[in-house]
Amino acid sequence: MNIDAAGLVDGALYMASPNCDDRPSGAAIELLVIHNISLPPGVFGGAAVTDLFMNRLDPAAHPYFAAIAGLRVSAHFFIRRDGALLQFVPCGLRAWHAGQSLWCGRERCNDFSIGIELEGADDVAFSAVQYDRLGVLARALHARYPITASVGHSDIAPGRKTDPGPFFDWQRYRASLRQPDNR
């Protein structure tokens, strides 16, 4: 998996989200933030997550959507249950995924992180193919940027966020970072 100078990943379906901006001058990408998302909550598949990140979520399509349709959020990447990889923001730009956040005494984690959303929920195990795709992506990101840590959204926004949730297998993820790329 290759990442170009702008931060676009080959093999990812790219859809440019408007919910991003420039990183602060000199900000290095040092953190991967892992999230989970499903819309409506607990429902997988469909276009709702993409629609949310592209500001086209129909508030009338589901009762839950009315409360979130005005949100302006994005992530750099979204990994579907079947392993499909979508990219919404080039890594060189700041995606709006972390919100109010703090890591190792530094606020505004969006400034120095890459956000990866997994299609899922706190109470559902992730698929094997999601872990495989996440591992390949994370290894490529580590090779390209000076990343020092991978954390959950809950680690940088405790009390406010719970994802990726208790079903995310951190041991499996960390083991995947040590695997060679033979693909």
Image (tube, rainbow, N blue to C red):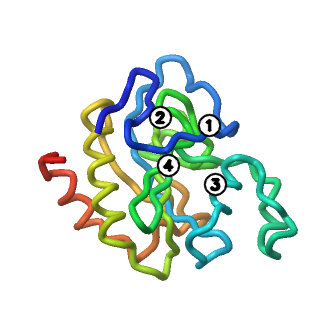
Identify the disc placed on residue 50: 3
How far is mark 1 from mark 4, CA to CA?
10 Å
Q: Quadrant of residue 83?
A: bottom left
Q: Name the residue under label 2.
A: 112
Going from N to C along the chain, the mark reached first, 3 or 1, is: 1
Name the residue nearer the viewer: 115 or 4. Answer: 4
Three-letter amino acid code at disc 1?
A: Ala
Q: Tell me the CA gap for discs 2 and 4.
A: 21 Å
The mark that comes first in sequence, 2 or 3, is 3
Name the one closer to the observer, 129 or 76.
129
Q: Give the residue drawn at x 45%, y 57%.
A: 79
Q: Position of residue 113 (x, y in %)?
A: 46, 39
* Position above or below: 163 against 87: below
Badge number at residue 130: none
Sooner in the amino-acid sequence: mark 3 or mark 4? 3
> Disc 4 residue type?
Leu
Are dots 3 and 4 in contact, CB under 8 Å? yes
Q: Residue furthest top?
A: 25
Image quadrant occupied by the N terminus:
top left
Instruction: Report x, y in % for residue 175.
Output: 18, 60
The alpha-carbon separation of the residues under discs 3 and 1 comes to 10 Å
Which residue is pictured at 47% across the width and 18% down the height? 26
Residue at 68 percent across and 39 percent down: it is: 19
